[in-house]
Image (cartoon, rainbow, N blue to C red):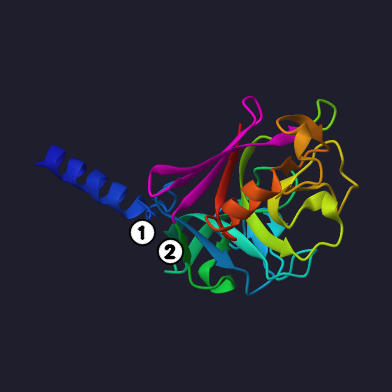
C-alpha cells in the first residue's frame, strides 16, 4: 500500500509540473500550391519566439522604401498560453532569411497565393510553379561574380511600373532580398526582378545582383505572379 501511495503521489506531482499549454506550430507554407502573405497594419517588433518577452529580431514597417503598402510572407501559426495567435513571418531585413513572430492583430487577413517563383543562378532560368505545375520558364541575367544575386527564400514585396529609365524595362518586382555586397545601393542594396534595355546580354552574370528578364518575358511573368509570391533563389 505504501509503495502504491508513493507512486500515485509521484504521478500527481508530474502532472502538476507539466506545462498547462503545449503550443503546436502549424506550417502554412506549401510552395507552388498554397502560401500566404499579409499586409502590415501595425509597425510592431518581430520576436525570435512567439512571446512578448522574447528577443526582438526586427520590426515591421507599414510602407516600403518605394511608398507601397508593405507585406510579409507568413510561414507558420501558433497560439500562446493566453490564447493569442502568433504568426511567423519572413522579414525583408538583413541578414537575408530572417524570420520573426508577430501577433496576428498586427497584420491583415491572410491572403492566399498559389504561385512560386524559382530562380537558378546556375542555369540562368526563372520558373513559375502554379498549383504544382510549371507554367512559365525564361532565361535570365543574374549578378556578376563580385555582386552575386543572394540565394535563399524570399518573396515579392512590391511591384513598380511606369519607369522612364529603360534600364529596368516596363516593370520591376521588388523582392525581400538584399545584396550582401552592395549594401548602400540602391535603397540598401534591394534586389529586384525586372526587365532590361540590353536583352542581348541575357543569359549570364550581368547585373549588380538583380535578376533581369527580357521585356517580353517580364510582361508574361507579370500576368502570373503578384505581390506576396514566394521566391526561391538557388
At numbered mark 1, what does the secondary structure look like: helix, strand or loop? Answer: loop
Q: Main secondary structure of the magenta part?
A: strand
Nearer to me, 223 or 132? 223
Q: Is residue 202 above or below residue 57?
A: above
**Residue ID at (28%, 51%):** 15
Could you say which quadrant of the image residue 159 lies in? bottom right
Instruction: Indicate which disc, 1 or 2, sits on the residue closer to the N terminus.
Output: 1
Q: Which residue is mark 1?
A: 20
122, above or below 160, in the image: above
Count of numbered circles on the image: 2
Q: Which label was assigned to residue 39? A: none
- Pick whichever, 138 or 32, lies toward us: 138
Q: Quadrant of the N terminus?
A: top left
Mark 1 to mark 2 CA distance (whole Å)? 8 Å
* Residue at position x 81%, y 25% in the image: 145
Name the residue located 16 percent from the left edge and 45 percent from the top edge. 5
Pick the quarter of the image with the C terminus: top right
* Foreground residue among 128 and 112: 128
Residue 91 placement, left or right of 8: right
Which range is magenta?
114-143
Q: Name the spot of residue 91 as percent of width and height, x first.
A: 65, 53
**Secondary structure beneath disc 2?**
loop
Query: In the rendered structure, does residue 141 fall within the stretch colored magenta?
Result: yes
| Callout 2 crowding tier (Cα within 10 Å): few <14, some 14–19, many ≥20 | few
Q: Which mark is residue 81?
A: 2
Q: Is residue 101 left or right of residue 172?
A: left
Q: Look at the numbered discs 1 and 2 and tell me whether their residues touch, using CB distance below 8 Å.
A: yes
Amino acid at each position: 500500500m505504501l509503495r502504491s501511495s508513493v507512486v500515485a503521489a509521484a504521478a500527481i506531482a508530474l502532472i502538476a509540473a507539466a506545462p498547462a499549454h503545449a503550443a503546436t506550430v502549424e506550417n502554412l507554407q506549401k510552395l507552388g500550391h498554397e502560401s500566404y502573405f499579409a499586409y502590415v497594419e501595425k509597425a510592431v517588433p518581430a520576436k525570435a519566439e512567439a512571446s512578448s518577452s522574447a528577443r526582438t529580431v526586427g520590426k515591421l514597417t507599414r510602407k516600403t522604401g518605394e511608398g507601397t503598402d508593405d507585406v510579409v510572407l507568413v510561414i507558420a501559426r501558433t497560439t500562446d498560453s493566453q490564447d493569442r495567435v502568433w504568426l511567423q513571418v519572413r522579414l525583408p531585413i538583413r541578414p537575408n532569411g530572417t524570420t520573426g513572430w508577430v501577433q496576428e492583430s498586427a497584420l491583415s487577413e491572410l491572403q492566399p497565393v498559389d504561385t512560386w517563383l524559382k530562380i537558378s543562378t546556375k542555369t540562368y532560368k526563372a520558373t513559375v510553379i502554379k498549383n504544382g505545375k510549371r507554367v512559365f520558364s525564361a532565361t535570365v541575367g543574374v549578378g556578376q561574380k563580385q555582386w552575386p544575386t543572394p540565394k535563399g527564400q524570399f518573396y515579392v514585396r512590391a511591384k513598380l511600373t511606369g519607369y522612364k529609365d529603360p534600364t529596368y524595362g516596363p516593370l520591376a518586382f521588388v523582392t525581400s532580398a538584399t545584396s550582401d555586397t552592395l549594401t548602400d545601393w540602391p535603397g540598401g542594396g534591394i534586389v529586384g526582378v525586372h526587365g532590361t534595355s540590353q536583352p542581348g546580354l541575357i543569359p549570364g552574370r550581368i547585373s549588380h545582383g538583380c535578376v533581369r528578364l527580357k521585356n517580353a518575358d517580364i510582361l508574361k511573368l507579370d500576368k502570373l505572379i503578384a505581390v506576396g509570391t514566394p521566391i526561391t533563389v538557388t
